[in-house]
Image: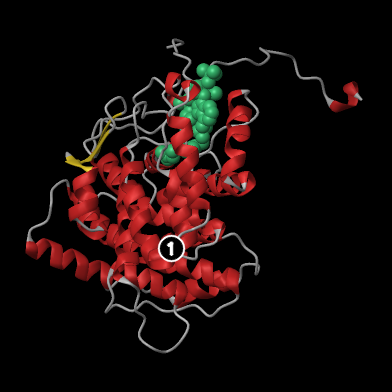
């Protein structure tokens, strides 16, 4: 008692034991349940990866079919949730709408508070993964003043999401399979990243044994902050500001003189390269093959080339991170910047839930309650207002 280590931001403190995601920042390794991210991105799909994250192992054919079936048939949300969403201001930020509507789901499924029952936990996990694209797509349509599109359960998870976002007629929605695959890969790349700010928020709130909708809403709230979910949007703004390749040297000089940061570069954990950034470059090529090249790509590629050869960035081990190219892809897919974080949230949901599921089954896990170093006044006698004023 009385002994505390001061570690703001938990930079040196392990807050839990976890078997979900392994990262070796020096070697640029990211593995979900032991499977390298490169292999998952190339050979798996987002729903299979979600199963892996939640259950710990890859599914058999029967398990996979049952999982996809369950998720597909829980994509609809209660009509009152729809009414609730319609009540937002016309210009409401989609992340604010997502945060509130996911929190609201807890009131539609009050049995979700019984977190000691494993069947019940499974049901809520399925519901959350299934409904996130519906809520995310509706928050996008709302901002555009367009009617909400109901899920089409004949489509795959990711194509259905695109349909709810972009469908403009009664005709069956069809997207180019290369775009569907690219978005699916982006979801896989974002699916978990061990104890990042939003996952820590899910665990911290979940440790009070609240229902998973409320814990997930806490994760969304953390992701809403610009230091966590907003970097890819800043990359686009930066590229636009640079404007042309010949302005890059001047911009780099400004970065080196401490005027600003090169957004999309550097990472707290990865000090060699971010394995997700390598995969994203390939997704970028695939998307631009369909949509035509984003004019900012040339600036991004040249900027990367110059930075990687520059002593300042080499010395500080600064490499492109996942956000350097993801914004360019999202923009090519017709997403406005305020939707980028919603996409991140949909991708991260299975990771949050895998970590939540691990937490509630961990007998050693206590309610999150860090210590503090008290810096305020000590015992003082209260002086009533009549004597103070
Ligand atoms: N541009 C220029 N200099 C940089 C950058 C950058 N992007 N990142 C770090 N540095 C410098 C920093 O100024 C410091 O220099 P010095 O030693 O001279 O003081 C040195 O590199 C070490 O930086 P740090 O701030 O101690 O590194 P950190 O691990 O605390 O920060 C970071 C990591 C991601 C916050 C930071 O690199 C950054 O702000 N990058 C730009 C924003 C960005 O792209 N964020 C997305 C991160 S990936 C998303 C995810 O995984 O969820």
Question: The residue tagged with tag 1: helix, strand or loop?
Answer: helix
Would you say the beta carbon of the disc 1 residue lies within 8 angstroms of ligand 1? no
Q: In the image, residue 294 lies at what x, y percent?
A: 49, 58
Query: In this figure, what is the number of numbered marks?
Result: 1
How is this picture coloured?
secondary structure
Residue extending farthest to the right is 389
Q: Quadrant of the N terminus?
A: top left
User: From the viewer's perspective, is 126 left or right of 148?
Assistant: left
Q: Is residue 4 above or below residue 340?
A: above
The residue at 43%/24% (across/down) is 10
Judging depth in this view, the residue of 135 and 102 nearest the camera is 135
Does residue 117 appear in the picture of this structure?
A: no
The residue at 40%/70% (across/down) is 162
Judging depth in this view, the residue of 292 and 263 nearest the camera is 292
Does residue 152 appear in the picture of this structure?
A: yes
Residue extending farthest to the front is 246
Q: Is residue 69 above or below residue 278?
A: below
Q: In the image, residue 179 lies at what x, y percent?
A: 35, 65
User: From the viewer's perspective, is 66 left or right of 349?
Assistant: left
Question: Which quadrant of the figure has residue 196?
Answer: top left
Judging depth in this view, the residue of 339 and 346 nearest the camera is 339
Question: Which quadrant of the figure has residue 126?
Answer: bottom left
Q: In the image, residue 341 lies at what x, y percent?
A: 48, 52
User: From the viewer's perspective, is 376 left or right of 224?
Assistant: right
Judging depth in this view, the residue of 273 and 217 nearest the camera is 273
**Which residue position is annotated with label 1?**
105
Q: Quadrant of the C terminus?
A: top right
The residue at 55%/49% (across/down) is 236
Label 1 crowd (10 A; few <14 / some 14-19 / many >=20): many
């Amino acid at each position: 008692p009385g002994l505390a280590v001061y570690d703001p931001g938990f930079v040196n403190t392990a807050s839990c034991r976890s078997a979900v995601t392994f990262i070796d920042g020096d070697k640029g390794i990211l593995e979900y349940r032991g499977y390298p991210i490169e292999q998952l991105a190339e050979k798996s799909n987002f729903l299979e990866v979600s199963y892996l994250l939640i259950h710990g192992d890859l599914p058999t054919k029967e398990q996979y079919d049952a999982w996809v079936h369950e998720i597909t048939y829980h994509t609809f949300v209660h009509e009152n949730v729809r009414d609730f969403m319609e009540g937002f201001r016309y210009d409401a930020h989609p992340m604010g709408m997502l945060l509130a509507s996911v929190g609201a789901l807890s009131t539609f499924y009050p049995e979700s508070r019984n977190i000691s029952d494993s069947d019940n936990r499974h049901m809520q996990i399925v519901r959350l993964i299934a409904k996130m694209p519906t809520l995310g797509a509706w928050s996008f349509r709302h901002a555009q003043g367009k009617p909400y599109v109901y899920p089409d359960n004949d489509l795959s998870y990711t194509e259905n999401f695109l349909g709810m976002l972009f469908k403009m007629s009664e005709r069956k929605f069809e997207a180019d399979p290369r775009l569907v695959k690219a978005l699916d890969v982006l979801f896989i790349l974002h699916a978990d990243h061990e104890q990042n700010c939003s996952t820590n928020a899910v665990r911290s709130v979940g440790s009070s044994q609240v229902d998973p909708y409320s814990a997930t809403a806490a994760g969304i709230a953390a992701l809403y902050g610009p230091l966590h979910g907003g970097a890819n949007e800043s990359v686009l703004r930066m590229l636009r500001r640079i404007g042309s390749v010949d302005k890059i040297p001047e911009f780099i000089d400004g970065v080196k003189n401490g005027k600003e940061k090169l957004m999309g570069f550097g990472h707290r954990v990865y000090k060699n390269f971010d394995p997700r950034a390598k995969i994203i470059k390939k997704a970028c090529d695939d998307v631009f093959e369909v949509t035509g090249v984003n004019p900012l790509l040339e600036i991004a590629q040249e900027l990367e080339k110059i930075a990687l050869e520059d002593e300042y960035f080499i010395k500080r081990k600064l490499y492109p991170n996942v956000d350097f190219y993801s914004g360019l892809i999202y923009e090519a897919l017709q997403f406005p910047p305020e939707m980028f974080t919603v996409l991140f949230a949909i991708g991260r949901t299975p990771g949050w839930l895998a970590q939540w599921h691990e937490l509630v089954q961990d007998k050693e896990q206590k309610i999150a309650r860090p210590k503090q170093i008290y810096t305020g006044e000590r015992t003082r006698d209260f002086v009533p207002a009549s004597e103070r004023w």
